[in-house]
Image (tube, rainbow, N blue to C red):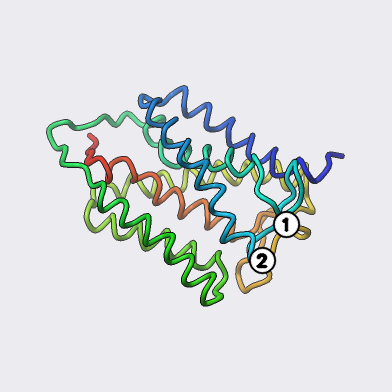
Amino acid sequence: MLSDKFAYFSLSMLYMLVWAIIYLKSPWKRGMVRVGLVGGIMGILAEYWYFRDYWRPPTLFGEGIVGIEDYIIGFALFGVGGYIHSSFTRKKIDFEKQTGAKNRDFLFLFLIGCGSLTLFSVVLGIHSAYVTFLTFFLLSAYIWVQRPDLIRLSIISAFATLGISLAIYYLNFNLLFPHFWDKYGMLDKPVLGYKLLNIPLSEMLWHLTWAMLCSMFRGYRNGVYYK
């Protein structure tokens, strides 16, 4: 039986496998890599919020400390959520409808996301899972209002990523490390600890709402429309 210290690493590598498949089919490979490099950094920074009350997973270097796994999974999830639609649909950029880049607005949304997690989770003590789901969803809704053409893309990407995540989690947390969430999760709040196939509902909601939001980053920030 594998040591628990490999649980998070195997999870991150399974996502990297999916990332590689999407990368091979994506028409925007350079962008996918660049987004992933930023995502890796965010994967590390996110543990500032999540180590407090969400989980303290073992890594190759110890328990409850930032590890290479955080960078890998951040890299992978930005690519999977952000580019899955471009790899498995025939949509192309509609160059006749492009608008100017919204770098300032995108930075504003980023700061709101980080600020809400810090204020409501760290300062006010609300569980980071609740804050994360609502933040991702509300930011998605904000973009939907401005870019209703991205709603369908967002919903499809969200459920496609959820399906992929369910398969990965079933393999990793049923066949390889079935005790993981009982031992390393901190999900005793209402709803969060409910499990389906030994997969916490909180994880399903995280991946669903994250892909819902992340899938629109490129179109919204760069003023890109699809046809």
Per the image, the residue denoted by label 2 is 187
Residue located 76% across and 40% down the image? 6
The image quadrant of residue 139 is bottom left
Instruction: Give coordinates of residue 8: x percent, y percent.
Output: 69, 44
Q: The disc labelled 1 sits on which kind of residue?
A: Trp
Which residue is denoted by mark 1 in the rendering? Answer: 181
Q: Depth check: 57 or 38 in front?
A: 38
Assign the N terminus to one quadrant of the image. top right
Name the residue nearer the viewer: 147 or 63. 63
Three-letter code, disc 2: Leu
Q: What is the crowding at mark 2: few (fewer than 14 residues within 10 Å), some, or many (at least 20)?
A: many
- Pointers 2 and 1 in contact (C-beta within 8 Å): yes
Q: Position of residue 73 (x, y in %)?
A: 58, 41
Q: Nearer the viewer, residue 215 or 31?
A: 31
Secondary structure state at the residue bearing disc 1: helix
Quarter the C terminus occupies: top left
Mark 1 surroundings: few (<14), some (14-19) or many (≥20) residues within 10 A: some
